[in-house]
Amino acid sequence: MLPDRIKRDMKLELEIQRVWESNFRVYGARKVWRCSEGIWCLLAAVERLMKHLGIQGIRRGKKCWTTVADDSLYRPTDKVNRQFTATRPNQLWVADITYVATWSGFVYVAFLIDVFARYIVGWRVSRSLQTDLVLDALEQALWARREIKELIHHSDRGCQYLSIRYTERLAEANIEASVGSVGDSYDNALAETINGLFKTEVIRHRGPWRNIDDVEFATLEWVDWFNNRRLLEPIGNIPPAEFEMAYYRQPGESTDTV
């Protein structure tokens, strides 16, 4: 007959494995513990059992550059100054691009993130780094967030974001453009953080990748999980969608723009 502690550990290991598997196998002990606080109380127990199971969270890799600055293009001023905070949804969006190596060549992924809850409002995958990549992500965000006002769009100095077509579309939607003034990673740090999570939790974790279709489907799955189920420490270890809904549940706030 097994001791009670062994029985309890076996039960907890099953729950740990379930939580870890259902979250893209990316969570470390702290997030696994937060997902199942009603089942155990000690973080140390989760750490011990994850080690026994031979599973762990994944670690971030290094930043790789995809956008290329063009100093000949008109550049809006930096209205963010590295202060990536917002008091409401649709106050500040940040944009960035990353790349993915596949067996059939490089593909590129553009994200547009609402800073308030880190909610990914637009994304697109393409074989090309041309303006259509970022413009399609913007159009998706504008469709998802129908009514916006006093919104700032911040990006790095990449030529895609400074193109005539992109800047005209921002102006048409009454969105104020902002571009990092220095050109280092801190000028667009929040967007690059989301890119880093994507590369760590999807691209490096689940590759190698055959083609653009595989990357696009995996990105679709990840964005849905990220927005609706992933725990984010900066917003209180809840998913972005839950954080936004808490804002709109306040008296006097409307959900029309969600």
Image (cartoon, rainbow, N blue to C red):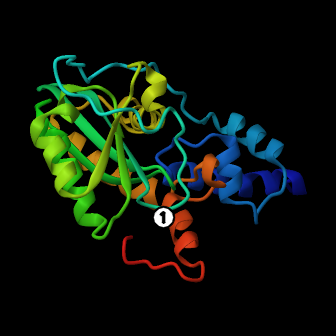
The image quadrant of residue 78 is top left
The image quadrant of residue 91 is bottom left
92 and 224: which one is in front?
A: 92
Disc 1 residue crowd, few under 14, some 14–19, many 20+, Cα 10 Å: some
In the rendering, at what x and y percent does residue 86 appear? 53, 52
In the rendering, at what x and y percent does residue 95 appear? 33, 40
> Can residue 213 be seen in this snapshot?
no
In the rendering, at what x and y percent does residue 199 appear? 39, 32
172 and 7: which one is in front?
A: 172
59 and 54: which one is in front?
A: 59
Q: Is residue 77 left or right of residue 85?
A: left
Which residue is denoted by mark 1 in the rendering?
A: 241
> Going 43% across and 77% down the picture, which residue do you hit?
255
> Going 20% across and 32% down the picture, which residue do you hit?
162
Q: Is residue 96 above or below residue 140?
A: above
166 and 51: which one is in front?
A: 166
Q: Quadrant of the N terminus?
A: bottom right
Q: Amino acid at mark 1?
A: Ala
Q: Is residue 195 left or right of residue 159?
A: right
Q: Is residue 112 left or right of residue 132?
A: right
In the rendering, at what x and y percent does residue 37 appear? 75, 60
> Can residue 212 be seen in this snapshot?
yes
Query: For numbered disc 1, what is the local secondary structure?
Result: helix
The image quadrant of residue 206 is top left
**Numbered label tally:** 1
> Going 71% across and 51% down the picture, which residue do you hit?
33
Q: Quadrant of the C terminus?
A: bottom left
